[in-house]
Amino acid sequence: MKELSRLFPYLKRHKLRLMLGFLFVTISNICSTSIPRFVGSIVDGMQKAQIDQDEVNASIGIILLLTIGSGFFMYLTRKTIIVASRLIEYELRNDLLIALERQSLSFYHKNPTGSLMALTTNDIAAMREFLGPALMYSANTITTFSFALAFMGSLNPSLTLMALLPLPFMAFLTYFIGKKVHIGFRDVQEQFSQLTSKAQETFSGVRVIRAYRREAFETGEFEKQSEVYQQRNIRLAFLQSLTMPSMMALVGFSNLLVLGYGGMLAIEGKATIGDLSQFFIYLNQLIWPVAAIGWVTNLIQRAAASAKRVGDIMDMESEIINDISETVKAKGISGISFEAVGMSYPGRSIPALDDITFEIPKGSSIGIVGATGSGKSTIAALLPRLFDSTSGVITIDGHNIRTMPLEILRKKIGLIQQEAFLFSMSLADNIRFGNPDASLEDVKRAAELAGLADDIADFPKGYDTIVGERGITLSGGQKQRTAIARAIIRNPELLIFDDAFSAVDTATEEHIIKGLSMLMEHRTTIIIAHRISTVALCDTIIVLDKGHIIERGTHKELLALNGVYANMHERQQLEEEFKHYSTEISEIEQ
C-alpha cells in the first residue's frame, strides 16, 4: 500500500467517475444475486405443484429483466471505472515525462534510455491495470460476496457456514502466492529494462556494428538477455498459474460441501430442493469473483512494483535547483563573469575546470580554444546550467545564475553543441524547434544565415524533407548547420557555439561566420573551437589546458606571445597548405 498510495491523488481527481462506477457495479450485482431467489421459488413451486404456467412465465420475465439490468449496469461500470483508469494513465505518463525533463544531465548518465523507456511502457501499463480492472473487479467481488452471502445466510445459516469453510485457505493462498508474484514481477521488470536498453543501444549503433562486423556478437548478447527475461517470465507465469486453479479447486470443494451437507438437510426436511438450487447458483456466481481475487492480487503486486520504480523517478529531485533565498529575474544579459569557477564530474579525480576567471562584456565575443579534454565544453554546459559548478560563482549582470529561474535563464541562451541532435520530423520543424511560433520566412532566414539554404534547395521536398531518426538522412555538416539555424531562430541574447563548425569545411565555415556577423553584432557570443580561424575575429580569446587558462588576449596579442596559441595557429596553417597542395596534385594527375 505504501507504493500504491502515490496513486491516491489521481484517484481523488476522478472520484465522481469512480463513485458512479461503484454504484453501477452494486446495482448490477443486486440484479444478478436476486435471480436465484426466483429460480428457487419456481423449483419449489413446481415440486409441490403450487405454481401455474402464468406464474412461471412471469418469473422468467423477471429473471430476463434482472439479467439485462445486470449486464447494462456492468457496461456502465466499465464505461466509468475503465475510462477513469485511461485518463489517469494519461496523467501518469505526462507527470513522468515532466519528472524526467526536470532531471539534470548527470541523471541520464546514470540511467540508460532503455530503462526509462520501460517505465513509460510496461510500468505505466501495470499501474493502469490496478487503477482500472483491479479496482473494478475488487468492487465486483466485494458486492457479489456481500449480497450472495446475505441471501445465502437468510436461507440457511448453517449451510452458508459450511460453504464458507474453504475461505481461510483462499486468503492464505492469495497472500502466499501474491508475495511471490510481487518479487517475480519486480525481477521481470528489471530484466525488461536491461533488455530494452540493450535493444535501444544496438539500434542506435547499428552502423558501427555493421562496420565492425559485430552482428553475430550483438545477436548473441541480446539472446543471453532475452533468455534471462524468458526464464523470469516463465517463473512468473508459473506462479500466476497457481492462483486460479487453486481458487477453482476450493470453489469446487465448497460445492461438494453444499451437496453433501445440503442433501442431508433436504432429506431431513430442513431444507428444500429450491434452497439447494439457490445455493448452487450462488456458488456459481461466486466462481469468478473468487478467481478474480487471485488475479486482482497479481495485478496489485505488479502495480506496487511498478509504482515504486516510477515513484522513485517522480520523487527524485533534480541536482539543478534554484537558490530560493534570492530569486532574481535578469532583464537581459548585460555581462557574464566567471569567478574562480571549478568543476569536477562525479567519478573523476581530475577536475574538468580549476580556478577559471574571466569576464564577457555585453555584446562582445569570446573565443575558447584548447586541446581535447581541456574543459571547453564544460564552460558551455555551465552557463545554461546543464551542470552546476562545484566551486566558484558564475554571474550574469552581477547576479549568481543559480538565483535565476532555469526557464528564464535558458530562454536567453542559444546553445549549439558539437553533436547535433535532430528529431525525426521535417527540416522546417527541426529549425522551428528553437521557436515554435516562427513563420516559414523566419525558418528560411535562419537557414540562410546558417549556410543551409542551398542544400535545402536541392532536396526534392525542400523544407518539408523528413530527416529521419537523429537526422540520419543528412550529412554531418548539414546536421550541424540545421542545429545552428535552430539556435539562430531562437534570437537569444547569448549565443554559444560549442565546436559547432567541426563537421563543416573551411569555406562553409567562412560563409556561416560571415552570415552570422550581423547577427552577432551587439549580441554576447561564445565560440568554442579547435580551429584558430573560427575564433580569430573574437574580441577576446582564452586558451585552456587541463582545465586552466594558460593564455588570453586578442588574436594578434596571442600570436605575438609565440606560445601555445601561436603554435596551434602555425600547425593548422601548415595543415591547410598541405591539403591545398594535395588537392592541386590530385587535379593535375587527373
Image (cartoon, rainbow, N blue to C red):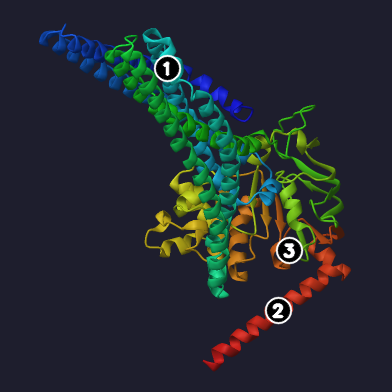
Task: Identify which amino acid the numbered label 2 is placed on.
Answer: Glu
Q: Nearer the viewer, mark 3 or mark 1?
A: 1
According to the image, label 3 marks what residue? 536
Whole-percent x and y of residue 49?
A: 15, 9
Judging depth in this view, the residue of 62 and 252 nearest the camera is 252
Q: Amino acid at mark 1?
A: Thr
Q: Which mark is residue 143?
A: 1
Q: Is residue 366 left or right of residue 441?
A: right
Compared to residue 425, the image places residue 171 above or below, namely: above
Density class for disc 3 (Cα within 10 Å; few <14, some 14-19, many ≥20) is some
Disc 2: CA contacts within 10 A as few (<14), some (14-19) or many (>=20)? few
Q: Position of residue 153 (x, y in %)?
A: 41, 10
Question: How many dots with numbers?
Answer: 3
Q: Earlier in the sequence, mark 3 or mark 1?
A: 1
Question: Visible in this render: residue 90?
Answer: no
Q: Amino acid at mark 3?
A: Ala
Q: State yes or no: discs 2 and 3 in contact (Cβ < 8 Å).
A: no
Displayed quadrant of residue 8: top right
- Outermost left residue: 53
Q: Residue at x 45, y 30 (%)?
A: 250
Local SS, label 1: helix
Q: Earlier in the sequence, mark 1 or mark 2?
A: 1
Q: Which mark is residue 575?
A: 2
